Image: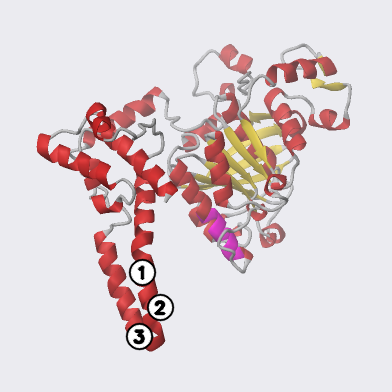
């Protein structure tokens, strides 16, 4: 009852801000759906019908002195869903109880009764909101606005990947519904790449939620320092006094004090949250648990390392079905939060046996599961040959498919550079000096 009241109050606050009752009408919301705030909703509706405008807050508070006007940030869709959910509960319980009594006498009659009652109820309470379609002709201006928006950002409408060529193919990790599956054999460095994308995004000011199924938070932290500022990862883990070559110096070395200065500056910032099974009493979390953490931390992007270290809230019997369920649930989380999710997934063992060295696993090689690839909006398959990382785009719901990006990758220092630099490309007539200075790696700094 208490929660219902909260959702109803929030919805009323939103309604008082609205110009009319369209919010209720378009969602099929009727006044009897308000279980705890009947008088308030009646007042608003009748005021609108009498005066052809919504009551202002002063008028409303005049009638309901104890009502608290809140600043509501929750989405209308969510509040309406919760309203309907509470109302449905009160309506469906008696139907099911009557059916239970009927079952003892005649189960077929009971089924017919249930079917008929539930159909009546569903007609009355449209749970899902049906849209009426969209005219691409009369709404053509929407498209012009979208195109102009894309021009402004040079096609990069999502979170940048940090790899120019990959940005061209993907337009970034998108807002809306985006489940990117990053696959490859064991030890190909999926975790590194997932964290690379997260580090680039963090540097652009986005908040990250990173689920690490097997690496400790310290390990994820040291890898971040390597990817972010190129401190030698081996050096950090082995407690070495020198931590690799210092960027932008002539052969200078990173020393302990450089790392200390870097850490002191870094620790004044925030926004890269790492969770491990320790945060869930040693269990593997499910998609909903990650969703509530993402909401809590206001994450802009979620990285999941990895699929086999998540649990299926529907508790399927076989890994294949569980993986399908988990990837579908993650896709739905992305759709609900309108935030991209990057999911690392192992290629299956067959793929490993049947492939020549250096070939990238195909979509159907995803471990135990064809469904994972179907739930994904994009699939990136990784393979490494002699220090060259090949990123193959095996599926791309929003763009070009079957493209490849080749990178030179030095894992220990976190450098990821294009195999072919821009200045090697004769089509470009820009000043080659400008290109060289950039060195192909964007350093986003702090």
Write down the region rendered in magenta: 320-328
Residue name at image x 36 percent, y 33 percent: 68
Answer above or below: position of 153 versus 195: above
Q: Is residue 81 left or right of residue 144?
A: right
Q: What residue does disc 3 label?
A: 108
Q: CA distance from mark 2 to mark 3?
A: 12 Å
The quarter of the image holding the C terminus is: top right
What percent of the width, then of the height, locates residue 204?
55, 24
Residue 252 or 425: which is nearer the viewer?
Answer: 252
Determine crowd level at label 2: few under 14, some 14-19, many 20+ residues with C-alpha closer than 10 A: some
Q: Secondary structure at mark 2?
A: helix
Q: Secondary structure at mark 3?
A: helix
Q: Position of residue 67 (x, y in %)?
A: 34, 35
Q: Can you give x and y, in whole percent of width and height, for residue 177 in the image?
A: 44, 44
Q: Is residue 282 left or right of residue 17?
A: right
Q: Can residue 255 be seen in the rendering of this structure?
A: no
Main SS, magenta region, reads helix
Residue 189: image quadrant is top right
Marks 2 and 1, the one that precedes in the sequence: 1
Q: Which mark is residue 94?
A: 1
> Do labels 2 and 1 touch, CB within 8 Å?
no
Q: Where 421 falls versus 432 (above or below)?
A: below
The residue singled out by tag 2 in the image is 100
- Does residue 327 belong to the magenta stretch? yes
- Residue nearest the viewer, comparing 291 with 18: 18
Residue located 61% across and 45% down the image: 304
Q: Is residue 229 magenta?
A: no
Please say if 157 is above or below 335. Answer: above
Q: 10 Å neighbourhood of mark 3: few (<14), some, or many (≥20)?
A: few
How far across and down, in percent of the image, does residue 126 sit? Answer: 28, 57
Kindly identify the residue that appears in the image at 29 percent across and 29 percent down. Answer: 145
Q: Quadrant of residue 425?
A: top right
């Amino acid at each position: 009852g208490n929660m219902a009241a909260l959702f109803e109050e929030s919805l009323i606050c939103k309604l008082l801000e609205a110009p009319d009752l369209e919010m209720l009408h378009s969602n099929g919301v009727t006044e009897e759906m308000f279980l705890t705030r009947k008088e308030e909703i009646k007042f608003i509706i009748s005021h609108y019908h009498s005066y052809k405008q919504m009551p202002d807050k002063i008028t409303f508070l005049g009638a309901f002195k104890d009502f608290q006007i809140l600043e509501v940030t929750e989405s209308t869709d969510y509040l309406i869903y919760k309203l309907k959910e509470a109302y449905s509960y009160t309506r469906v319980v008696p139907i099911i109880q009557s059916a239970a009594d009927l079952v003892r006498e005649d189960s077929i009659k009971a089924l017919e009764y249930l079917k008929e009652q539930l159909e009546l109820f569903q007609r009355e309470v449209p749970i899902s909101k049906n849209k009426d379609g969209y005219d691409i002709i009369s709404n053509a201006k929407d498209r012009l606005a979208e195109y102009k928006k894309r021009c402004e950002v040079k096609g990069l409408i999502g979170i940048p990947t940090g790899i120019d060529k990959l940005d061209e193919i993907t337009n970034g990790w998108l807002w809306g519904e985006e489940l990117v599956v990053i696959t490859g054999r064991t030890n190909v460095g999926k975790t590194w790449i997932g964290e690379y994308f997260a580090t680039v995004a963090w540097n652009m000011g986005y908040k990250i939620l990173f689920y690490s199924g097997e690496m400790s938070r310290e390990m994820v932290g040291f890898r971040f320092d390597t990817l972010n500022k190129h401190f030698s990862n081996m050096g950090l883990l082995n407690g070495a006094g020198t931590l690799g070559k210092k960027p932008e110096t002539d052969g200078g070395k990173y020393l302990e004090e450089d790392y200390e200065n870097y850490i002191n500056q870094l620790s004044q910032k925030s926004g890269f949250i790492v969770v491990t099974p320790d945060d869930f009493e040693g269990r593997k979390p499910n998609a909903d648990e990650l969703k509530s953490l993402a909401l809590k931390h206001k994450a802009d992007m979620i990285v999941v390392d990895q699929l086999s270290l998540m649990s299926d809230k529907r508790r399927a019997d076989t890994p294949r079905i569980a993986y399908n369920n988990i990837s579908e649930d993650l896709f739905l989380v992305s759709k609900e939060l309108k935030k991209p999710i990057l999911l690392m997934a192992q290629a299956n063992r067959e793929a490993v046996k049947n492939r020549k060295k250096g070939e990238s696993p195909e979509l159907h090689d995803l471990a135990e599961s064809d469904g994972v690839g179907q739930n994904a909006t994009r699939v990136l398959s990784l393979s490494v040959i002699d220090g060259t990382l090949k990123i193959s785009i095996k599926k791309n719901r929003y763009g070009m498919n079957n493209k490849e990006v080749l990178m030179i990758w030095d894992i220990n220092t976190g450098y990821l550079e294009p195999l072919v630099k821009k200045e090697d490309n004769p089509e470009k007539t820009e000043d080659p000096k400008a290109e060289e200075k950039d060195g192909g790696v964007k350093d986003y700094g702090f």
